[in-house]
Amino acid sequence: MDLSLRRLLLVVLVFTICGEVAAQPADSVIAGYQPAVDKIIASAREENDAYLKLQELCDDIGNRLSGSESLERAIEWAVQSLKADGHENVRSEKVMVRKWVRGNESCEMISPRPCKLNMLGLGGSVATPKDGITAEVIVVKDKDELDALPDEQIKGKIVVFDVPMPPYSEQDGSGYGRVVQYRGNGAKWASERGAVAALVRSVTAYSLDSPHTGAMRYSGGPEIKKIPTAAISVEGASLLHRLQNRGKTPVVKLYMEAEDQGEVPSANVLAEIVGSEKPEEIVVIGGHIDSWDVGQGAQDDGCGCVVAMEALNMIRKLGLQPKRTIRVVLWTNEENGIAGARSYAVRHQDEVHVAGIESDSGGFKPQGLSIDLQDDDKEQLAAAQLSEILTLLEPVGATRVTTGFSGVDVGQLKPTGTACMGLSVDGRLYFNSHHSWADTVDKVNPKELTECAITVAASAFVLADMSGKLGEE
Ligand SMILES: [Zn+2]
């Protein structure tokens, strides 16, 4: 089919869905799912185990960095929990992941006065020498300012990137994406100019002197020396910046024992409701079972895991069996490698994944789904079809469809044509505790978590049962 004809069909179809056209087959077919969706909503609001599962994962096991014993316990817990819920084909699939261990670490300002700086080493960083690194700091407000400095002002110093994350706004969202590059690349940029270490202002718009960790990379070739790098709090970065602005040159001592211990085995966890008519066609729902090694990994991404687990449970408890298979996948190693999702995509490349929904933005009040397809025309069509499906979720308020993004893990299925989706939630508070000691169960509202699981359960059920596929006419 040529492009113009497809465009024309697309316009006709979108008009049919959005316009005031009475009793279109597409409308009535989707509307026919309202009783099933209402049942899911009513029974889940009456009773569900999402919050209980979250407590078992986060309070009993705790945080779960790749390669840690606690992650292995979490994987075992998930397998047992999914079996106890009576699902089919519950299993773990081995994945090799990198094991990075933080060890002891500290950061303090030595001059102009002694002052502890709250810090967290960045995942993937090398250690400092045994005695730490003590050096003058040079604070920059962004990469341009670093680029404009002469080498002699950077060489031998600790570069501090004091780049503020903008506050959340309805229009632009969190601003995380605009600033997180400094966490990922700051050490490389500083090392290229001869610095001995890099400190990065934590990627958050709100702070109570809490450092926020995350992954970094030493890309750029073997000629660049690997220098240690850590996140300091907003307050710490601001202090150093203010002192520099008044003509002082703070001296900081950084100490880190961080170590890459090579590859170790981990696993993805899978469970299914097998489809009644097309069991070989799969709708994936999931989150990532690993977390950073601080806090409890509650919002990131304990919520995503229990949302997928409990969504499958909600469907099973009602005896709803869709035509296609719904498969929970709890990916390992999202935070510092994405090895779980990459391994899943390769291992299951011969299967038909018609759609996938990832939940990795926290368990806040759901707003709808974001959708991302390899083919732009198909994405537009799929978004229109998804809007129709999400009208079923008006009682939850999760009717909004956005395009162009899904999630890091489910996104690995995008090249094969899968309609990849991400659960959108009210993102105002997510980055306040993200990747910090404060990402704990108390930040999760059980009612909102329930609504997230309802949204995923209802969407997955319709996608698995409807006659066509998203993005197909
Ligand atoms: Zn996450």
Image (tube, rainbow, N blue to C red):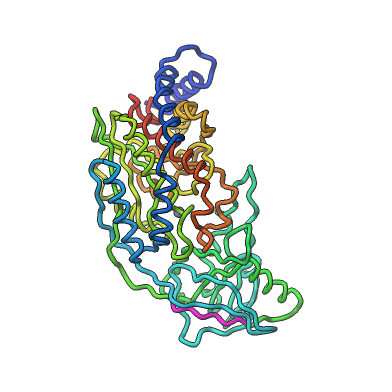
Relative to 430, 280 lies left or right: left
Residue drawn at 44 percent across, 26 percent down: 38
Number of labels in the image equals 0
Residue drawn 24% across and 33% down? 279
Q: Compare residues 304 and 406 and report the one nearer the observer.
A: 304
Residue 418 visible to an observer of this rendering: no
Answer whether residue 167 is visible to the viewer in this image.
yes
Q: Nearer the viewer, residue 4 or 183?
A: 183
Above-or-below relation of 449 to 235:
above
Q: Please provide percent x and percent y for residue 65.
A: 39, 63
User: In the image, which residues are magenta?
Assistant: 252-257
Q: Nearer the viewer, residue 359 or 49?
A: 49
In the rendered image, residue 455 lying in the magenta stretch gets the answer no
Q: Is residue 402 above or below residue 222?
A: above
Residue at the front extreme, as displayed: 46
Quarter holding residue 1: top left
Q: Which secondary structure type mostly characterizes the magenta part of the structure?
A: strand
Rendering coords of residue 448 (x, y %): 51, 42
Examine the image and state in which quarter residue 48 appears.
top left
Q: Give whichever of 90, 224 is nearer the camera.
A: 90
Residue 263, x across and y down, in percent? 30, 67
In the displayed structure, 110 sits above or below 355; it is: below
